[in-house]
Amino acid sequence: ITLKEMSSGAADLRQRKKQNCTESDKMAPEERNKENSKLGRSPKYVLIQRFAKLFFGCLAAVTSGMMYAVYLSTYHERKFWFSSRQELEREITFQGDSAVYYSFYKELLKAPSFERGVYDLTHNNKTISLKTINAVQQMTLYPELIASVLYQASGSEEVIEPVYFYIGIVFGLQGIYVTALFVTSWVMSGTWLAGMLTVAWFIINRTDTTRIDYSIPSRENWALPYFACQVAALTGYLKKNLNCSAEKFCYLLVSASTYTFMMMWEYSHYLLCVQAVSLFLLDSFALAQTEKVHEVYKTYLLSLFLGYLLQFENSALLVSPLLSLVAALMLSKCLQMNIKKGTFISRLLKIMRIYLVLTITVTLNFLLKMFVPHKENEHLLKFIEVKLGLNTTKNFTMNWLLCQESLQAPSQDFFLRLTQSSLLPFYILVLIICLFSVTQVIFRTICGEPLKETVKLEDGRIGERPEIVYHVIHTILLGCLAMCLEGMKYLWTPYVCMLAAFGVCSPELWMTLFKWLRLKAVHPILLALILSMAVPTIIGFSLWKEFFPRIMTELSELQEFYDPDTVELMTWIKRQAPVTAVFAGSPQLMGVIKLCTGWMVSSLPLYNDDDLLKRNENIYQIYSKRSAEDIYKILTSYKANFMVIEDSICNEVGPVRGCRVKDLLDIANGHVVCEEDDSYAYSKYGRFCHEIKMNYSPYVNYFTRVYWNRSYFVYKINTVISFQS
């Protein structure tokens, strides 16, 4: 095949796509005019009806998003009494990694110029002792960059405080998130009643749909609204008989939201890989237009390329499974294009395509990891090995991750909550009907029966709609991940809300069910239309009666979040500790110290850097059974001047024995003796955090207590060691 023939083939393909667009644009009005003339409707009446439907639907979607954002803001105020707190007390509400993200936002606002602030973050040596980091790349601080630019460019300094502006943006994004889910369900079902039900289920199951209550600045709270917009646009893009202008708009929205999503979250390419697998299966079963699917693949490639450049040549994107998968898919398409259709080889290649793509993906990813230097996310692979039982380890970090609630299998309470809100039963019903319909369609295509260009209500073939099949596959894949890791429920449950709401509000789904049941007593189309209105209405009223009073009680109830011990500790550090001091302690507390005081710390609650993970493990040794000399050497190696011991960790009484920090340290250090199916911690030294409180030698030789309260004990690390008893 010559270059001239390939170029002429590509030109023919583009010409056919243009002709198809033109034909669909011309045919759609003609078909609609025929239907309207049969029903006795004038074109003007139909136009007014459609405009009214679109207007009220958009109004309902935007209103739902705005009300949800207001609801989050009101709940946050009631929970933390934010408006009546001092700045220090407000900042203490940011815990762990959230405190670190917000601290960099503060630094950007304090910088003399935006350029200087960005430079200081990319060459940051004032956060972690003995370490210069590119904080923008390592912590994905693009949300903070955007928030600081908007705050200063909009002239909000005299109107609103920085913290309110910051959390206001996050709450606004959550409103966009809900609006995008509303639109997706509306596009799929054809009625905005499905969007209203989606929002209701999302808010009622807020504990399992979002982490906004616990960690406002977390990366997924910034990123997932853009992913929801991408999914909404992709849903519209995959629809059949879409006119050219709508198709181009959806494609542009898919491209923009995909790139933005990738820039907001360092793990976004993994979620996009799951989406790419869904599209690949959709294309493999010939349930969608191949050209559309491959256009989305090109969007992935462009986003990865731009992300690699703008994220300071982030090697994690080069070795990501998304890049390997998309490259394999594009290569398999080239092989199919260069082989004549209808031949034995083309049929064989079509059958072997899934195996071929999988093999090329694994091989390409292995080669990339061999030749591209990378360190990012290696701990994730080790974690997966241990999680799947392929390996065992005594490593503190791995065992600590395995003990985290978000990385364990979901509890029974999770399924109970979804069942009580009626979400899970309806989701399973919709999923079963759609799966059976899709299976029927696949068998028809194997037998050579062509798919219909336009699926009508009376056909009862919901499985022939590509956007529906995509969402079914996507929720199944996300559901498999959520069954393994509870933290993945925040990705799965919102789309469960959307798919369940679409199903109960869709006449096509009920018609598909009635086609199988072969109803004769009642007209199936009439019954499907009645049920698509009656069922969601009944669900809505029952949810309103049971859950609306609870939500109103939540908003009217004044909760109290006050941590006087932490406030006292931060006040003491700001007043008494030298500006050049370096603090050592648990990573979660170090994040709060960094935010509230600005002092340098020896570790941070970040888990995407092997060096920081090793630091965290070493500094956690203050809760182990090690000698005073060992702890002194560890802390001085990081140039620490002060050590903070938390009583809550030292005297922790966890619900699961073996998952407390001190238990994990004893296992890692080999201080565990097993006798008669039980284990005991043993060492010739006592637990350091207990022994140091006794104020006897040799502990007083290395450390001097300078501050304490009910929760914290602060010790100065002596520069001159005295061995007097």
Image (cartoon, rainbow, N blue to C red):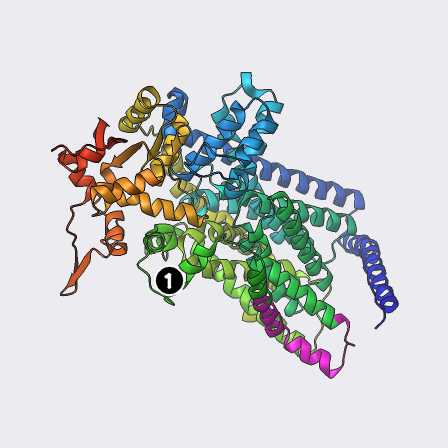
**Is any part of residue 93 visible from this angle?**
no
The magenta-colored residue range is 337-363
Q: What residue lies at 56% left-to-right and 67% top-to-bottom?
A: 362
Q: What residue lies at 25% left-to-right and 36% top-to-bottom?
A: 645
The residue lying toward the viewer, choosing from 3 and 274, is 3
Q: Is residue 456 above or below residue 498?
A: below
Q: Pick out the residue farthest to the left.
A: 725
The dominant secondary structure in magenta is: helix
Q: SS of the residue at dot 1? A: helix
Q: How many marks?
A: 1
Question: Which image quadrant is residue 276 in?
Answer: bottom right
| Left-right relation of 509 to 602 | right
Q: What residue lies at 60% left-to-right and 20% top-to-bottom?
A: 155
Q: Residues within 10 Å of mark 1 (few under 14, many from 20)?
A: some
Residue 222 position in % (x across, y down): 53, 40
Q: Which residue is mark 1?
A: 386
| Left-right relation of 371 to 220 | right
The residue lying toward the viewer, choosing from 366 and 333, is 366
Q: Is residue 329 above or below residue 625?
A: below
Q: Is residue 582 above or below residue 650?
A: above
Residue 441 position in % (x across, y down): 63, 71
Q: What residue lies at 67% left-to-right and 75% top-to-bottom?
A: 350
**Is any part of residue 19 visible from this angle?**
yes
At label 1, the amino acid type is Val
The quadrant of the picture occupied by the C terminus is top left
Residue 13 position in % (x across, y down): 82, 63
The quadrant of the picture occupied by the N terminus is bottom right
Q: Is residue 343 magenta?
A: yes
| Left-right relation of 269 to 16 | left
